[in-house]
Image (tube, helix red, strand yellow):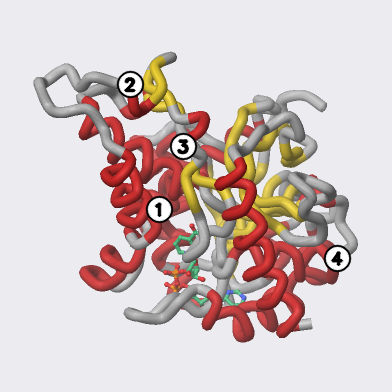
Amino acid sequence: MSVIENSKLTVVGAGAVGSSVAYAALIRGSARHVALYDIATEKTEAEVLDLSHGTQFTGSSDIIGGSDISVAAGSHVVVITAGAKQKPGQTRTELAGVNAGILKSMMPQLLEVAPDAVYVIVTNPCDVLTVLAQETTGLPYERIFASGTVLDTSRLRWKLAERAGVSTSSVHAYIVGEHGDTEFPLWSHATIGTVPILDWVPLDGQPTFTPDELDQIAVDVRDAAYKVIQGKGATNYAIGLSSARIVEAVLNDEHAVMPVSTVLDQFQGVSGVALSVPSIVSASGALPIPETTFSEKEAGLFRHSADALRQVADSLR
Ligand SMILES: NC(=O)c1ccc[n+]([C@@H]2O[C@H](COP(=O)([O-])OP(=O)(O)OC[C@H]3O[C@@H](n4cnc5c(N)ncnc54)[C@H](O)[C@@H]3O)[C@@H](O)[C@H]2O)c1
């Protein structure tokens, strides 16, 4: 595989998340062509117009869209954000039934017009929907995956960076597992530069991190979406950027390491469930990195995450 020329991204769903994915992709020049598809005709056409009106100030990307699925024809990457959204106080798994039904009927239609695309699922609960959509389509595991904990990982790195007094890009830490209530940080591998997180001495005279503080940071990251949704009804900008970044890793064949969620096959003893683990993202899709090691506690949390999601998926089959 190599870098894709004249690359095409289709974003399915023109709501708060989908329009932000398209906006981020245009600004970042993630794909040469961007398409936006949604059943809400008027809303989609308005979003496409609004986005088009700004293209003088972006790169050479262009945008089309509408409520006919043919706008997705020939896509190299399809990012799916269509569905009902999380209401205040509602967990991601409560959304599962409705969104599973939407995906089940939409995937065959999408595959008909974009048979060779890599599919990235953002709609929640994204891990469970990935397993069900993989089963519906029979796509190879690597070609259909969820954005998973890429966003949560960015939230974690931002929080650690703020506290440590370094730039976000100098924090090396991952949230893994479910994108949701059972997710957890791989603290055993978290470093700032090369320094293990608990050994880091903040530059501004602040005390060093303690295990209790790290636990609290993990909870804050896990619950971050609830806080944003409480305040503004949706999370959109950060997931827009996270998704655009995943799209770039595919279209540029980057082999970038990202915590996306693919259906696992004997990863830490887990199979048949989609969970986020550090994975190599390239033009062929996403491949979990089998050499990733967990501490004993992390392995237990990972199995707990897998069991929780297996139950939800089973209830929807
Ligand atoms: N994975 C993540 O990190 C993450 C982050 C934020 C939001 N989300 C999820 O993204 C999803 C979208 O959130 P939102 O705030 O944009 O919701 P929204 O309600 O603003 O937009 C959803 C859009 O989906 C469209 N839609 C519904 N059924 C459709 C169908 N069959 N075909 C095409 N389009 C259809 C609707 O018309 C609507 O425009 C939700 O499930 C939300 O929980 C995921």
Q: Mark 4 points at which residue?
A: 137
Say left or right for 244 vs 270.
left
Q: Name the residue under label 3.
A: 187
Query: Earlier along the polypeptide chain: callout 1 or callout 3?
Result: 1
Q: Mark 2 points at which residue?
A: 199
Q: Position of residue 21 (x, y in %)?
A: 47, 52
Distance Cα–Cα, label 2 vs label 1:
46 Å
Residue drawn at x 63%, y 85% as measured from the top left: 97
Q: Is mark 2 on a helix, strand or loop?
A: helix
Residue drawn at x 30%, y 73% as measured from the top left: 233
Residue drawn at x 15%, y 28% as measured from the top left: 207
Circle 2: residue type = Asp
Query: Earlier along the polypeptide chain: callout 2 or callout 3?
Result: 3
Q: Position of residue 126 (x, y in %)?
A: 60, 64
Q: How crowded is mark 4: few (under 14 residues within 10 Å), some or many (20 or more)?
A: few
Is residue 177 placed above or below 292 in the rendered structure?
below
Is residue 114 placed above or below 205 in the rendered structure?
below
Q: How crowded is mark 2: few (under 14 residues within 10 Å), some or many (20 or more)?
A: few
Q: What element carries label 3?
A: helix
**In this view, which residue lies farthest toward the top?**
194
The answer as to whether callout 2 falls within 8 Å of ligand 1 is no
Q: Is mark 4 on a helix, strand or loop?
A: helix
Say left or right for 160 vs 203.
right
Distance Cα–Cα, label 1 vs label 3:
40 Å
Distance Cα–Cα, label 4 vs label 3:
35 Å
Tell which of 142 and 89 is nearer to you: 89
Q: Which of marks 2 and 4 is in front?
A: 2
Q: Position of residue 33 (x, y in %)?
A: 60, 43
Circle 1: residue type = Leu
Quarter of the N terminus within the rendering: top right
Q: Nearer the viewer, mark 1 or mark 4?
A: 4
Residue 51's disc number:
1
